[in-house]
Image: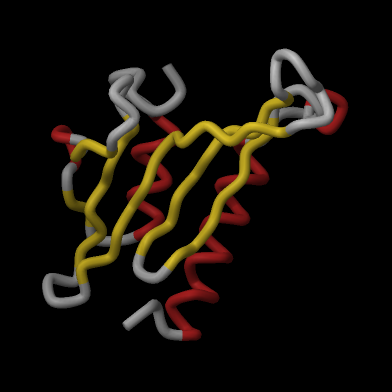
Amino acid sequence: MALTEIELKRCEKAIAAFMANRRPPVHLRDELDLGYRVDGHSVEIFEIRPDWKDHAIRRESPVAKATFVRTKGVWRVFWMRADMKWHGYEENSEVRSLEVFLDVVDRDDYGCFFG
């Protein structure tokens, strides 16, 4: 079962605040931007950049992912390693809210999300 409507609205509100704080200035967004998607129980944050050969093509690079585990009431935190697979973020592998997840991603204490 996916997130409920209420949970989805809370997610969108929290992510909107994160994006407002973290996105690059408007004049740079053609070269680098942030986006997100909600799919089922997961929220994924990604960078958007033009393709290095063809600037008309936009490429997405995964940054972070959180998956809600309803039975435990926690969000599992993941980061994308160089092997292009999601790995648990060991420092905060589970958090109690999406806001805490977004704070962990924003701080990026170990350079796993934004390098």
Q: Determine the residue positioned at 39% across, 78% down.
A: 3
Relative image position of residue 1 (x, y in whole percent): 32, 83
Q: Determine the residue positioned at 58% across, 33% down.
A: 47
In which quarter of the view is residue 103 placed?
top left
Q: How is the image coloured?
A: secondary structure
Residue lying at the far right in this picture: please name it: 27
Q: Is residue 20 above or below residue 57?
A: below
Relative image position of residue 72 (x, y in whole percent): 12, 71
Q: How many callouts does the rendering have?
A: 0
Q: Is residue 56 above or below residue 8?
A: above
Q: Is residue 31 above or below residue 97?
A: above
Q: Determine the residue positioned at 29% across, 24% down.
A: 83
Point out the image quarter for the C terminus: top left
Relative image position of residue 31 (x, y in whole percent): 76, 22
User: Left or right: 94 with respect to 5?
Assistant: left
Relative image position of residue 22 (x, y in whole percent): 60, 35
User: Left or right: 50 with respect to 84?
Assistant: right
In which quarter of the view is residue 64 placed?
top left
Instruction: State the residue in front, 12 or 41.
Output: 41
Instruction: State the residue in front, 97 or 115.
Output: 115
Q: Determine the residue positioned at 87% across, 26% down.
A: 27
User: Left or right: 42 with respect to 60?
Assistant: left
Instruction: State the residue in front, 42 or 105.
Output: 42
